[in-house]
């Protein structure tokens, strides 16, 4: 499954996380019904609430199925430092909603 994730911090914890329209690069490494893990260069603390929007695609050798766009609110439950100053974030989904496409 491949997807693009766009997120922003709902309530910045400190001035360091005031993003003012600036894109933050992250790589999703795992996803389930209840949450996801992603790796980013930003040190986003536990308990930070994120708003995310992404589209799920099921990719098979002969076909790609579009599952539709989703709006999700999640909470950072873990932040594990990794190599090269990156952080693996564990995000628990607290609200999910499928977005209607017209």
Image: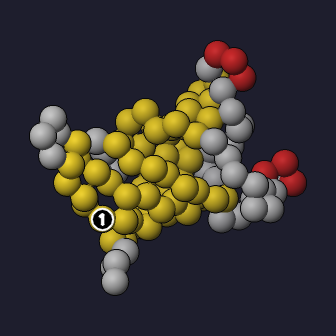
Q: Nearer the viewer, residue 9 or 22?
A: 22
The N terminus - image quarter: top left
Image location (x, y in percent) of residue 64: 21, 49
The residue that disc 1 covers is 68
Colour pattern: secondary structure
Q: Is residue 70 left or right of residue 45?
A: left
Q: Is residue 42 left or right of residue 80?
A: right
Q: Residue at x 63, y 30 (%)?
A: 87
Q: Identify the secondary structure beneath mark 1.
A: strand
Image location (x, y in percent) of residue 66: 25, 58
Q: Residue at x 78, y 51 (%)?
A: 17
Q: Nearer the viewer, residue 33 or 57?
A: 57
Tell me if residue 65 comes above or below residue 89 in the rendering: below
Tell me if residue 7 comes above or below residue 27 in the rendering: below
Task: Kindly give the residue lying farthest to the right in the view shown.
Answer: 15
Q: Nearer the viewer, residue 41 or 100?
A: 100
Image location (x, y in percent) of residue 11: 71, 64
Q: Residue at x 56, y 33 (%)?
A: 39
Task: Kindly give the residue lying farthest to the bottom in the view shown.
Answer: 102
The C terminus - image quarter: bottom left
Q: Is residue 78 visible?
A: no
Q: How many marks?
A: 1
Q: Residues within 10 Å of mark 1 (few under 14, many from 20)?
A: few
Tell me if residue 38 comes above or below residue 102 in the rendering: above
Task: Kindly give the residue lying farthest to the top in the view shown.
Answer: 83
Q: Residue at x 42, y 43 (%)?
A: 36
Q: Is residue 25 visible?
A: yes
């Amino acid at each position: 499954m491949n997807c693009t994730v766009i997120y922003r911090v709902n309530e910045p914890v400190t001035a360091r996380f005031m993003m003012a329209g600036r894109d933050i690069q992250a790589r999703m490494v795992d996803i389930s019904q209840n949450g996801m893990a992603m790796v980013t260069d930003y040190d986003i603390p536990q308990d930070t609430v994120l708003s995310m929007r992404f589209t799920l695609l099921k990719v098979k050798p002969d076909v790609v199925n579009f599952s539709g766009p989703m709006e999700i609110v999640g909470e950072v439950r873990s932040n594990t430092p990794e190599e090269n100053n990156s952080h693996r974030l564990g995000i628990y989904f607290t609200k999910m909603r499928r977005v209607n496409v017209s």
